[in-house]
Amino acid sequence: QKEVEQNSGPLSVPEGAIASLNCTYSDRGSQSFFWYRQYSGKSPELIMSIYSNGDKEDGRFTAQLNKASQYVSLLIRDSQPSDSATYLCALSTGYSTLTFGKGTMLLVSP
Amino acid sequence: SAVISQKPSRDICQRGTSLTIQCQVDSQVTMMFWYRQQPGQSLTLIATANQGSEATYESGFVIDKFPISRPNLTFSTLTVSNMSPEDSSIYLCSVATDNQPQHFGDGTRLSIL
């Protein structure tokens, strides 16, 4: 059974700081990893995908993947109050179906 | 990415009734999925909607309770049958093309009285 673990939070950071969100998973066959952002009352929005070990940067967001440690993280630099949301880690074994973690709530204070 | 329209956006229903939720995409997509998100919880996959054949259901979900149709590559429906208060949830449609990541519709917020 696939498991995706995230700290539920809330993770509180001040504006301008780096927010670090972490996710561990149990299925070593997982091939694709995603971070979705979900604002309260809204549907999830894809913000990052990563498929190979290492870092992937997109603007203020950096995803990090370590398959040996079964660990994926999301760093948000220069955090803004508008980044306050729940961040969902999701993974796939390659057939498009996703398994989601329970999400980490991020609160960025002005 | 594709534009996904989900209807209705919300509804309040009586127990024992059924509701059909529609998911329309503005372009052909390979995969369509239906998820449930219960209050304060993460997303749980109900089923994969297969074009021209029966949906593939996840453990704990059955066709009699959640019948799904997918007549073509741009449209799918999910019916929540014989509803009870435990079915109060957000139901989400997502789509993917080839091996691209999934994108979600706006969801249907369903309350059962």
Image (tube, coloured by chain):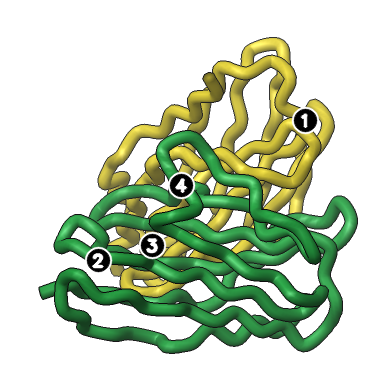
From this view, report whether residue B18 is shown above or below residue A4: below
Disc 1 marks a residue whose amino acid type is Gln
Mark 4 sits on what residue? Answer: B62
Q: Nearer the viewer, residue B51 or B105?
A: B51
Q: Are marks 1 and 2 in contact (CB under 8 Å)?
A: no
Secondary structure of the residue carrying tag 2 is loop
From this view, report whether residue B107 is shown above or below residue B41: below
Q: CA distance from mark 4 to mark 1?
A: 28 Å
**Image mark for residue A85:** 3
Q: CA distance from mark 1 to mark 2?
A: 37 Å
Mark 1 sits on what residue? Answer: A31
4 and 1 marks on the same chain: no
Identified at 44% across, 79% down, the residue is: B20
Q: Residue furthest left?
A: B113
Colour green maps to chain: B
3 and 4 marks on the same chain: no
For disc 1, the chain is A
3 and 1 marks on the same chain: yes
Q: Position of residue A90 (x, y in %)?
A: 58, 42
For disc 3, the chain is A
Q: CA distance from mark 4 to mark 2?
A: 14 Å
